[in-house]
Amino acid sequence: MNSARTLLSIQALEIDYPSRDGQGRVTAVKNLNLDLAQGEIGCLLGSSGCGKSTVLRAICGFEPVKAGKILLRDHVVSSASSHLPPNQRKVGMVFQDFALFPHLNVLENIAFGLQHLSSNERSAVAMEWLKRVSLSDKADAYPHELSGGQQQRVALARAMAPEPDLILLDEPFSSLDIELRERLAGEMREILKSNNITALLVTHDQFEAFAIADKVGVMTDGKVLQWDLPYELYHKPANRYIADFIGRGVFLKGVVQANNKVRIELGELDLEEDRSAEIGKEIDVLLRADDIQHDDHSTLLAEVVRKTFRGADFLYTLKLASGVEIFAFVPSHHDHAIGERIGIHLVADHVVTFS
Ligand SMILES: Nc1ncnc2c1ncn2[C@@H]1O[C@H](COP(=O)(O)OP(=O)(O)OP(=O)(O)O)[C@@H](O)[C@H]1O
């Protein structure tokens, strides 16, 4: 990446906390590296306790770092030996619960961070941001009079109004219902992109991460395992943990064949990497729900053991002859009963395998 355009760079970051018994320290973030270019949206994706919020707090300047460094526009803002105070970092934050001031109306909430401007300028800038988040008609409303989605847009406008270099979003959709989340994730991406704002969010929800971010880092146990485009994470997971975490899939046993194919219970698949040194060896092949297609005419049969209606399709859990269960998305007009055996075939084109 061209370093002139890199806005946020985190290098070999390590953060620890005092242990419960007060006797030692517990490492919460280990050797974490990532870069975000100006205007890029990044996301740290991981389950509860993996260290996501700790990273955000460190970028804001609320958490000292033990080793490594955080750079904003090529300037070190945090390292073991230096620490720029939070109010000098030009970093805005949107909290999980939005944290709007209940006694201030919407316009006053957004104007709050603009104390350096005259009163008239403050109102004008705040109104401009209200317009950008499509809430011009709510300037006089109080936070409790807004829906969750509207509150979130106010929180976003409040964070963006002082024009920070970077916006951090801590689980910005977790207090909203699931349907709203997906729509707002798309809206938030549009607002950030149309204003060329660099943002880093954290979430445990893969769909949120994919809906918003240009780059996603899968985090576990204080480490980023892979920092990559969502497409690459899905199709080229660097290891088993990521393959398992991203997308619903199962591992099937396969045997490497002479023609650089792998034979699994459902047939043969082309291997992407050269495995000629492993002919006859057993490997694990990742099969995702979208690698299996239902086909009434196929002679390859699998038994429906579970199904979840998702609107346009069903997610079927299918049992193979060996007893192994796989997943398949099937258009919802193919409504088969539990226990029925249905025809399937393999449509995998990117084959992910692990030795
Ligand atoms: N102030 C603290 N003192 C001691 N340990 C802490 C402190 N804050 C966080 N931790 C520990 O550090 C680890 C990472 O916490 P962090 O809040 O960053 O995780 P997270 O991925 O954001 O989780 P969640 O999604 O649940 O918010 C956890 O094991 C947590 O218990």
Image (cartoon, rainbow, N blue to C red):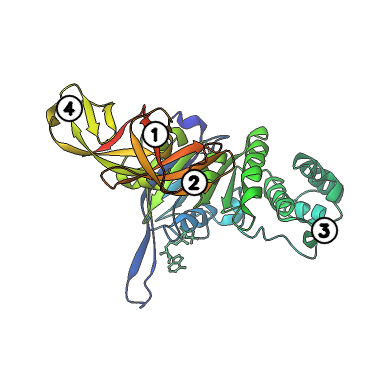
Amino acid found under the numbered disc labelled 4: Gln
Compared to residue 150, the image places residue 102 above or below, namely below
Q: Residue sitting at 34 percent across and 30 percent down?
A: 299
Query: Which residue is denoted by mark 2 in the rendering?
Result: 206
Q: Quadrant of residue 33?
A: top left
Q: Is mark 3 within 8 Å of ligand 1?
A: no
Q: Is residue 306 visible?
A: yes
Which disc, if any, is residue 343?
A: 1
- Judge depth for marks 4 and 2 and give the one in front: 4
Q: Is mark 1 within 8 Å of ligand 1?
A: no
Placement of the N terminus among the 4 image quadrants: top left
**Disc 4 or 2, which lies upstream in sequence?**
2
Q: Residue sitting at 75 percent across and 55 percent down?
A: 147
**Crowdedness of circle 3 by 10 Å Cα count: few (<14), some, many (20+)?**
some
Where on the image, by quarter, is ligand 1?
Answer: bottom left
Q: Is residue 89 visible?
A: no
Which disc, if any, is residue 105?
A: 3
Q: Is residue 165 left or right of residue 325?
A: right
Amino acid found under the numbered disc labelled 1: Gly
Amino acid found under the numbered disc labelled 3: Asn
Q: Nearer the viewer, residue 154 or 36?
A: 154
- Judge depth for marks 3 and 4 and give the one in front: 4
Q: Is residue 143 left or right of residue 177?
A: right
Compared to residue 108, the image places residue 126 above or below, namely above
